[in-house]
Image (cartoon, rainbow, N blue to C red):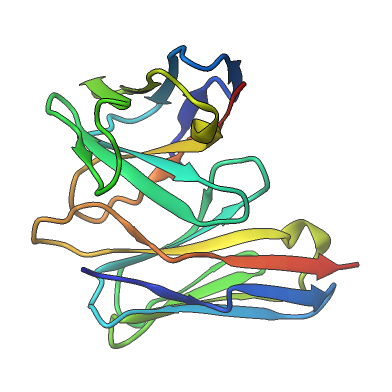
Amino acid sequence: GAVVSQHPSRVICKSGTSVKIECRSLDFQATTMFWYRQFPKKSLMLMATSNEGSKATYEQGVEKDKFLINHASLTLSTLTVTSAHPEDSSFYICSARATYQGTHPAFFGQGTRLTVV
Amino acid sequence: GQQLNQSPQSMFIQEGEDVSMNCTSSSIFNTWLWYKQDPGEGPVLLIALYKAGELTSNGRLTAQFGITRKDSFLNISASIPSDVGIYFCAGIHYGGSQGNLIFGKGTKLSVKP
């Protein structure tokens, strides 16, 4: 399957600081990337969908000014958690698809464990 | 909106037993996907199904795309301890305004040696 690399795998930051998480598709061009948040023992919660070159579409209840998403190229999307608070601590996972619609499945990054202290 | 109902939520089985889980929906999907997530990792694609009625195997795993296109199941035969994890189904529906995948809530599998 296709390879999606997410970095960093773990990050600890202080309250009030910002953290950037990168998601790269290594062997295909990702027209669409998704960002998920996962609480312990829970399912994947879609935060936003980003299409290359356009603004991300955020799910209801997700603050776009807090979770900044940039999808500037076909192989890279970034999620920046701004002014992080302890309640932002979670497991964040990205996934990438070659197309917005159609048959292509999504491939996931390894996830980023964010801890805000 | 479209929703997937995945069951069971969790399973506790003995090593060597067979496992079956499924996803159903009131909506039609054009593609069904099955993923496995190990603790602390991102989900990994196990099987992709593209045609109604399609039956596909990947080692001890077998998945089928329901004839009605509203359901799919995943079977694991002769389970082993490394099968532990959360299994997610996902459906893709073409057309309309929604191009992203719809995920089930997952089935947590525990295997007792």
Q: Position of residue A35 (x, y in %)?
A: 37, 38
Q: Position of residue B21 (x, y in %)?
A: 56, 78
Q: Position of residue B46 (x, y in %)?
A: 53, 57
Q: Position of residue B81 (x, y in %)?
A: 82, 61
B100 is higher (above) or lower (below) than A51 = below
B43 is higher (above) or lower (below) than B14 = above
Instruction: State the image quarter where residue B3 is shown.
Output: bottom left
Kindly give the residue lying farthest to the right in the view shown: B113
| Residue B53 shows in the view | yes
Drawn side of residue B86 relative to residue A77, left or right: right
The quadrant in which the N terminus of chain B is found is bottom left
Drawn side of residue A101 relative to residue A106, left or right: left
The quadrant in which the C terminus of chain B is found is bottom right
Instruction: State the image quarter where residue A21 is shown.
Output: top left
Drawn side of residue A57 relative to residue B75, left or right: left
B67 is higher (above) or lower (below) than A15 = below
Foreground residue among B61 and B91:
B91
Instruction: State the image quarter where residue B71 is shown.
Output: bottom left
Foreground residue among B63 and A91:
A91
Kindly give the residue lying farthest to the left in the view shown: B96
Kindly give the residue lying farthest to the bottom in the view shown: B68
Residue drawn at point x = 46 percent, y = 52 percent: A44
Residue drawn at point x = 30 percent, y = 41 percent: A62
Drawn side of residue B29 relative to residue B53, left or right: left
Residue drawn at point x = 53 percent, y = 65 percent: B106
| Residue B49 shows in the view | no
